[in-house]
Image: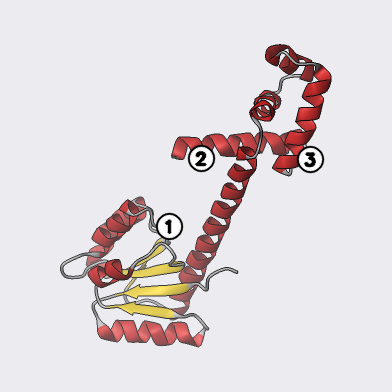
């Protein structure tokens, strides 16, 4: 069961926080309110899902500072920055660091809601992709050493007889291993098998 998404509002202006909370409530979105970046960071945990609505300019710890702290912790929460006119350069820098968008004050409520819905969709997509990748890696890990050798050979486009020659086994044995590999990985075509190989390589590079 997927955890319910929330919108985490971080703004040092109590009026802004309450206004945003009421706006989100009208469209059925649940909000958690924080008066400072420090307060949010203390409450943050990796199980939080949804998006972060973050003021750029705050005392003690700015929105950019919080964004950097969350990056250091490996957070994937999409961030939408709320910015005043003079904060545009800071907001642009936030985008370069991975923020999903920034909204200028004063903003149209519907514009903000549209951005929030996009951020929530991005959060959901990213989490599902992580689950899919984890499942793929678990399937690859379930291969025996010989099956993995065959998997690599097939993914590289080698013929069964070539793989057999390189591994010192018969072509028939390669075919049996290949069938088991396809079954364990849950794939039916060579193209799907190659995508699994690419995905595992990408994960090893990122980690």
Q: CA distance from mark 3 to mark 1?
A: 32 Å
Which quadrant of the structure image shows residue 153?
Answer: top right
| Mark 2, other Cα within 10 Å: few <14 / some 14–19 / many ≥20 | few
Query: Is residue 111 visible in the rendered structure shown here?
Result: no
Question: Residue 102 location in percent, x, y?
Answer: 37, 64
Of callouts 2 and 3, which one flags the residue occurring earlier in the amino acid sequence?
A: 3
Foreground pick, 147 / 117: 147
**Relative to 76, is 133 on the left or the right?**
right
| Tag count | 3
Which quadrant of the structure image shows residue 170?
Answer: top right
Q: Which residue is mark 2?
A: 203
Determine contact: label 3, label 1, CB under 8 Å. Answer: no
Q: Residue shown at 43%/67% (left/top)? A: 48
| Mark 3, other Cα within 10 Å: few <14 / some 14–19 / many ≥20 | few
Q: CA distance from mark 2 to mark 3?
A: 22 Å
**Relative to 139, is 83 on the left or the right?**
left
Q: Which residue is mark 1?
A: 76
SS assignment at label 1: loop
Of callouts 1 and 2, which one flags the residue occurring earlier in the amino acid sequence?
A: 1
Quadrant for the N terminus in the image: bottom right
Foreground pick, 114 / 97: 97
SS assignment at label 3: loop
Instruction: Check the image and tell me how it is coloured.
Output: secondary structure
Q: Residue shown at 38%/78% (left/top)? A: 32
Question: Residue 85 location in percent, x, y?
Answer: 26, 68
Q: Residue shown at 47%/78% (left/top)? A: 110
Front: mark 3 or 1: 3
Q: Residue shown at 38%/66% (left/top)? A: 80
Q: Residue lying furthest right in this view?
A: 172
SS assignment at label 2: helix
Q: Which residue is mark 3?
A: 188
Quadrant for the C terminus in the image: top left
């Amino acid at each position: 069961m997927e955890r319910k998404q929330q919108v985490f509002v971080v703004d040092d202006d109590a009026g802004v926080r309450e206004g945003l909370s009421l706006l989100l409530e009208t469209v059925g979105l649940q909000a958690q309110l924080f008066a400072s970046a420090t307060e949010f960071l203390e409450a943050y945990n990796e199980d939080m899902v949804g998006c972060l609505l973050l003021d750029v300019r705050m005392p003690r710890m700015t929105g950019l500072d919080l964004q950097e702290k969350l990056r250091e912790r490996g957070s994937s929460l999409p961030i939408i920055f709320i910015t005043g006119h003079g904060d545009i350069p800071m907001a642009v820098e936030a985008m370069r660091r991975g923020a999903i968008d920034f909204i200028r004050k004063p903003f149209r409520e519907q514009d903000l809601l549209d951005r929030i819905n996009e951020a929530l969709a991005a959060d959901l997509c990213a989490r599902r992709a992580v689950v899919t990748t984890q499942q793929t890696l678990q399937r690859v890990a379930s291969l025996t050493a010989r099956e993995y050798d065959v998997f690599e050979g097939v993914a590289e486009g080698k013929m069964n007889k070539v793989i057999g020659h390189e591994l010192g086994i018969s072509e028939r044995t390669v075919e049996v291993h290949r069938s088991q590999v396809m079954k364990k990985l849950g794939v039916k075509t060579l193209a799907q098998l190659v995508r699994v190989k690419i995905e595992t390589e990408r994960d090893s590079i990122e980690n």
